[in-house]
Structures are given as C-alpha cells and as structure tokens.
Amino acid sequence: MPADNRPPTWLLHTQRAVLSRAQALACGITANSIEHRIRRGGPWQRLLPGVYLTVTGQPSWEQCETAALLYAGPDSVITGPAALANYGVRGGPKARRVDVLIPLARERLSPGFVAIHRTRRMPTSVAVDLALRFAPAERAVADTVRQLSGLAEARAVVAGAVQQRYCTVEQLVAELRAGPIRDSARLRSVLAEVIAGIRSPAEADFRELIIHSRLPQPLFNPKLYLGGVFLAQPDAWWPDYGVAVEVDSREWHLLPEHWEQTMARHRRMSAAGINAMHVSPRQVRDESVALLAEIDAALRSGRPLPGITTTPLAA
C-alpha cells in the first residue's frame, strides 16, 4: 500500500515511532515544521539521512532497524546478525550494525549504524514484524558467516540455526551454492563438517583433538548394530577396543527429548558391553591433555565386542 495513503497514526504504530521525510511530507507536515522538530532540543531526532524518530530518548534497536529499512528504500531486507537475533538463533554474534540487502540497481551509502549490501539475489520471501522485514534464516546465516573471522564462531551460528530448526542443512547448502564464492570458505567448511555428522561446535573441536593426537584413530559418527538391530551412533567409536565417546552439551540439547535420547543411547551401549564415555565441551577445550589420557586408558583396557557390527558414516 503506498505510503501516501496511510494515516500518520498507523505509520507511527507499525514503524515504532520512526518516520521518513517523504512520509512526513505526505502526511501534511511541512519542510519547515520538520526542521523545527529536529532542531537541537526538539521533539524529533534525526536517526539517518531523511529518517526521524518522532520521540525523545535513546532509540531502541527495533527503531534503528526500522530506520535502516526506511533509509534503504522499498523492498530492502535486514540480514546478518540482526536477522539472526530476530529469529532467536543461539550462538550468533551480537548485532552491532544493521545489515540491509538492497537491489543491485539501487545506490545507497552505509551511514552510521547501517551496512548496505547491494545484491542480485534479493530474497523472494521474508519474515515480517510490523514494518521490519528479515531475510530467510538460511540467507541470514550465510551472510553472517561471511562476516566472521573464526571457524568456531561459524560453527556456533550454523549449529544454532539448524538445531533450533530455523533452517535445514539442505537449505544452507543451496544458499551456499547460490551465493558468492568470496568469503564462503568458512561456511563451506562448517557444512562439510555437518554433512560428516558433526552436530555442534564442541563435537568439531573434539574431532580435531583426536585427529591430531597420538591415539588410534576412531570411526567418527558410525552406526552400531547389535544382532542386526540399530544400537547407537556415537561421536567416536573404536571397534577394536569397544570404546565409544560422545560429546555432551546441554546447550545443544535444546529440547528435553534430545537429552532423554542421549541417556537412552548410553544405556543401550552400556548394556551391550560398550565403554561409553561422555565428555563435556569444557573438557575438550580446557582439559584436553587429561581427556586424551583418560581415553588412552580406556583403550588400553578395552577389547573387541562380539555381536556388534559397524557401518561407517560414509557407507
């Protein structure tokens, strides 16, 4: 609906008391009146060029986001960490600016707290909160990861979005393929880990720890069967020693049934004679030497278990 036909009260409600200059003029507020209202000590504030907050006080983050979209123009969409925060994705970086997608043909600078990204791939669907428009979760994840410098941060973003079911691995893979190659290496690496069966950043750290240790190399995320019946799929499995390791983190067991499933899996493995070891992300991160020694001791006292067959993940 064109802005000219919308009453001021409706605009101010849906736009959280934020108004563009064009909207103010269309509502009958003169240019001189606008200048008077945004004077020093006046009742309005200029948030961005041509965009005003019509109340006093510190603007909220949502008001800043609204201002960013009004500045960026029609069909602009918020992406990156700000969009992830709107979805409630855990593990994402704190949004310190508002990343906004605009069509490639449109010219805009990036003033103040706004980062403008011109793109040929404007989202065809968006999430809406009053006047706010957010890119789909998979696009927001990809755009966020491209900004990050560390692999651990990228793992946390992807794990949070997928495990909270805001997007699927398949959607992220499709987004990776459709997006630019530049700055895509971290997302490509994390998705390769996810496809390999790694479910959380802590599990990825554990995998790296074991690979670079002097321990016998296990099978990662294989499927174990007892008498032809599925038993479990531990994070690491040493079939010659009957030892399995699972990295447990309540942060990534976001639903109660996830934790219950972990405990049931432990009971099944223990009943089959498997030495099922559970380690925490803190042990992987801060007590790696002691953890490796503990696993080594378990391997030294272990033995093959009859009746248990293994199917590697890649099989």
Image (cartoon, rainbow, N blue to C red):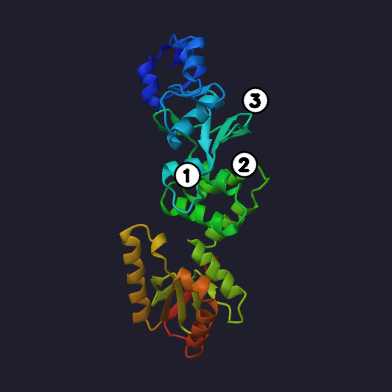
Up-down: is 222 above or below 239? above
Taking the spot 34% from the left edge, 57% from the top edge, the residue there is 255
| Residue 179 sits in quarter | top right
- Pointer 1: what residue? 84
Number of marks present in the image shown? 3
Tell me if label 1 and label 2 are in contact, CB under 8 Å.
no
Question: Which mark, by number, is residue 269?
Answer: none
224 or 182: nearer the viewer: 182
Q: Which amino acid type is marked by label 1? A: Leu
Q: In 3D space, how far apart are the residues under numbered discs 3 and 2 (Cα atoms)?
A: 21 Å
Q: In 3D space, how far apart are the residues under numbered discs 3 and 1 (Cα atoms)?
A: 25 Å
Question: Which mark, by number, is residue 107?
Answer: 3
Up-down: is 147 above or below 105? below
Determine if residue 19 is in view. Answer: yes
Up-down: is 255 above or below 34? below
Determine if residue 311 is in view. Answer: no
Q: Which amino acid type is marked by label 2? A: Gly
Quarter of the C terminus within the rendering: bottom right
Q: Position of residue 227 (x, y in %)?
A: 38, 77
Instruction: Name the secondary structure under disc 2.
Output: loop
Q: Which dot, 3 or 2, sits closer to the camera?
A: 3
Taking the spot 50% from the left edge, 65% from the top edge, the residue there is 202
Q: Position of residue 96 (x, y in %)?
A: 53, 43
Instruction: Name the secondary structure under disc 3.
Output: loop
* Left-right relation of 59 to 210: left
Q: Which dot, 1 or 2, sits closer to the camera?
A: 1
* Left-right relation of 9 to 171: left
Marked residue nearer the N-terminal end (3 or 1): 1
Question: Which mark, by number, is residue 179?
Answer: 2
Determine crowd level at label 2: few under 14, some 14-19, many 20+ residues with C-alpha closer than 10 A: some
Quarter of the N terminus within the rendering: top left
